[in-house]
Amino acid sequence: MLAPSRELDGLDRRIVGALQVNGRASWRRIAEVLGEPFSTVTRRGIALLDSSIVRVAGLVTLGPTHLVEVHCEPSRLVAIAEELSRDLDAIFVYALTGPTRLLFEVQARPGRLSSLVLEELPALDGVVQVSASPVMEYFRTVAEWHPGPVTAEETAALQEMPPPPSRPSASGALDDVDSHLVRILVADGRVPVTELGEAVGLSAPAVRRRLNTLLEEGTLSVRAIVEPSDIGLPIEAVVWVRTAPSDAVEVGRLLAEAPGVRYAVMAMGEFQLMANVTLASLNELRDFLTSSPWAARALAVRSSLVVRAYKRGGVRMPALG
């Protein structure tokens, strides 16, 4: 995305970085790890959340996900993107420079994919063509994207949960209590365990056990959502990579390890790999596309700039203004 930064200062960026590592970490824990006064971290952290510069939200994964590309009439792009962002199953919605104009990731419950591709999307005024590719493996998710200025030692001190599973799977239906917990955390990923317990009628230890299980299984992830431009990364792009089939996994891992990659997956289609990358400049993007280790193994590359994100991590983004 080509966008101006809101010029967060160094400490604000470090607090955002800490929340990206562990969105549920207490202000006291963040202050201890960063070596900053508790009152300062609390005041600044609350201000960042209240201003929606950063939002911490839960994302539930109950089934396989698909990447959907939508070609549409330019005059209808904004309206279609807004409509897609309202879909509760949509994880991200990006407007691109082309040739695909809109890209989104969606959780496809049983029967939803055929309805979405054959009926729902074609019925939207302005949609010209739709294609969908199932995600077969995650090499990196946004929950693992930690670009903020926190050190490796600070990251290790803040982390509490293992990374989510690399292969998407259906986790099955949640019971009533877990469903209630998830609904609360989707709205606000920082609700304390004591408040969660009061809401569902369980003790704090019981809620903590349930929450840990949801996080460990990958059914729930808690993410700090922030515009990359606000933390000094105004250039955002989507990159598709075609490799020899036998090289796809290894190249996917190399792609995920490249600086700036916030999301990398293997999907069906002519281009087996897709990555979302955020960088500080077009020069860095040029180097990423031409000099990265993964690039030497690529047979073909297709790339587009992200010009606007309508949804990130399951959270609708505010209108530009």
Image (spheres, grey):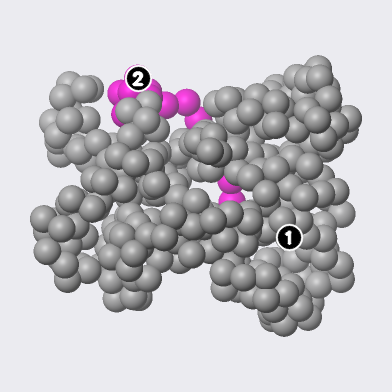
> At label 1, which amino acid type do we have?
Val
Residue at 39% over, 33% down: 186
Q: Which residue is mark 2?
A: 176
In the rendered view, does 265 fall on the left or right side of 46?
Answer: right
Q: Which residue is mark 1?
A: 239
The x and y percentages for residue 247 are 77, 71
Q: Main secondary structure of the magenta part?
A: loop
Residue at 16% over, 24% down: 198
Q: Which mark is residue 165?
A: none
Q: Are marks 2 and 1 in contact (CB under 8 Å)?
A: no
Is disc 1 placed on a helix, strand or loop? strand
Q: Residues within 10 Å of mark 1 (few under 14, many from 20)?
A: some
Q: Is residue 151 above or below residue 21?
A: below
Residue 146 visible in the picture:
no
Residue 8 visible in the picture:
yes
Residue range of the region highlighted in magenta in the rendering: 166-181
Outermost residue on the front side: it is 321
In front here: 101 or 164? 101
Q: CA distance from mark 2 to mark 1?
A: 40 Å
